[in-house]
Amino acid sequence: MERLTDNLTKYKQIVQEMLREYAQSKPAYGEIEVELIFDTERNHYQILHLGWHHNRWVHHCVIHLSIKNQKIWIFSNSTEHDIAADLLELGVIKQDIVLGFYPPFMREMSDYAVG
């Protein structure tokens, strides 16, 4: 049980630090704010872009990650970052990364966790 708690704490720190780093990059267009959303109680993490671009309202979830069952789930990534590769570099093992934006049958064909 201690290992699971340690992994959860470690993964929370890794995800938060990584997203803080990603959030340093602001869009080159419009009056867009970058907003970090960390729900550390339920383990949901997002980067949102909000603001105006050419008189159009922008409200876009750029990245959405969650930690479920001791695994980091990548649900959305509309950046140029390879989040899974970055997580590996930060010490997360492949078996603890789920490409949640793929259906389960496609996840089975990857080197990452199915769920």
Image (tube, rainbow, N blue to C red):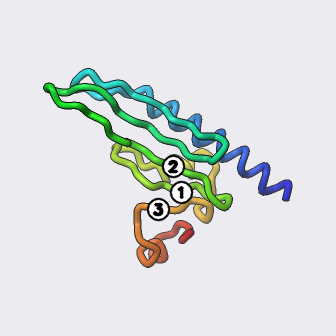
Q: Which mark is residue 95?
A: none
| Residue furthest to the left | 54
Q: Which mark is residue 65?
A: 2
Q: Secondary structure at mark 2?
A: strand
Give the residue at mark 3: 100
Q: What is the C-alpha distance between the residues marked 1 and 3? A: 6 Å
Q: Residue at x 23, y 31 (%)?
A: 57
Residue 92 versus residue 81 in the image, above or below: below
Q: Which mark is residue 73?
A: 1
In the image, residue 17 lies at what x, y percent?
58, 34
Q: What is the C-alpha distance between the residues marked 1 and 2? A: 6 Å
- Mark 2 belongs to which amino acid? Leu
Q: Do the residues under discs 1 and 2 have CB atoms within 8 angstroms? A: yes
- Mark 3 belongs to which amino acid? Gly
Q: Quadrant of residue 13?
A: top right
| Residue furthest to the top | 31
